[in-house]
Amino acid sequence: MLNAVAAALLASAIVIPPGAPNETPPPGHITIDIVTVNGSGCPAGTAAVAVSEDNKAFTVTYSDYLAQVGVGAQPTDFRKNCQLNLRVNVPQGFTYGIAQADYRGFAHLERGAYAIQKANYYFQGMSQNDAKQHRYNGPHSDDWQATDTTEVAAIVYSPCGEKRNFNINTELRVYPGTSNTATTTSFVSMDSTDGAIDTTYRFSWKTCP
């Protein structure tokens, strides 16, 4: 199995540093610093990052990320976005990629309305991965969840020995469609009733030569 994975990596068109993917994270505790935060979906102080105790994932928590249309909404509220620039402090001899991203939130969509969640991520100075999006149609008034998974051979790793910040771009949109915006409100959020929900990014670790 490991030989097959290694062969797939070598055959990939993406340039990846030597070494096979390793599910075993480095020792100690990884830390992440938020370098910059931009976007209408994450005003200052409303986004936070935390690394899991086992170093296998990190979460981004939003507390004011909501797009809406209809009663009480401003014309620009139909679209919200957030751009995070993160510094992942990795021990010497290791590098990482992102194998999976889990997004969660809540949506209330009137009949005829619909919402779109969109996201991509990339290392500073490298090509962006293709943005993936998910659509939710009204009527809907419940939690939503989306998972974007990258095949092993397609995971892009931060180059060994280089300091490259990690960029995350997310976006929420809600469209009225055929719903009546004069009497109803439709919204989609990347948060929960208690004001926080985790967006989880799952690491794929490699050792550097």
Image (cartoon, helix red, strand yellow):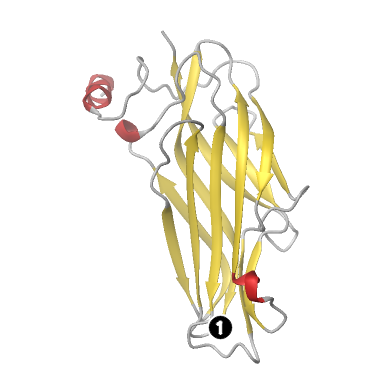
Instruction: Name which residue type carries label 1.
Output: Glu
Residue 182 % position (x, y): 64, 91
Residue 59 % position (x, y): 62, 41
Residue 47 vertical placement versus 9 (above, below) = below
Q: What is the total number of numbered labels drawn onto the structure image?
A: 1
Residue 39 vertical placement versus 154 (above, below) = below
Residue 131 vertical placement versus 70 (above, below) = above
Residue 187 % position (x, y): 61, 73
Along the horizontal axis of the image, is 179 left or right of 8?
Answer: right
Q: In which quadrant will I find the C terminus? A: top left
Q: Residue furthest right?
A: 45
Q: Nearer the viewer, residue 10 or 85?
A: 85
Q: Residue at x 21, y 26 (%)?
A: 11
Does dot 1 land on a helix, a strand or a loop?
A: loop
Q: Are there few (<14), some (14-19), or many (20+) residues within 10 Å of tag 1?
A: many
Along the horizontal axis of the image, is 131 left or right of 190?
Answer: left
Residue 47 % position (x, y): 71, 47
Q: Nearer the viewer, residue 199 or 117?
A: 117
Q: Residue at x 55, y 52 (%)?
A: 170
Along the horizontal axis of the image, is 129 left or right of 121?
Answer: left
Q: Residue at x 64, y 16 (%)?
A: 28
Q: Residue at x 40, y 36 (%)?
A: 127
Q: Residue furthest top?
A: 209
Q: Nearer the viewer, residue 176 or 29?
A: 176
Q: In which quadrant will I find the N terminus? A: top left
Q: Nearer the viewer, residue 81 or 187?
A: 81
Task: Write down the residue under mark 1.
Answer: 110
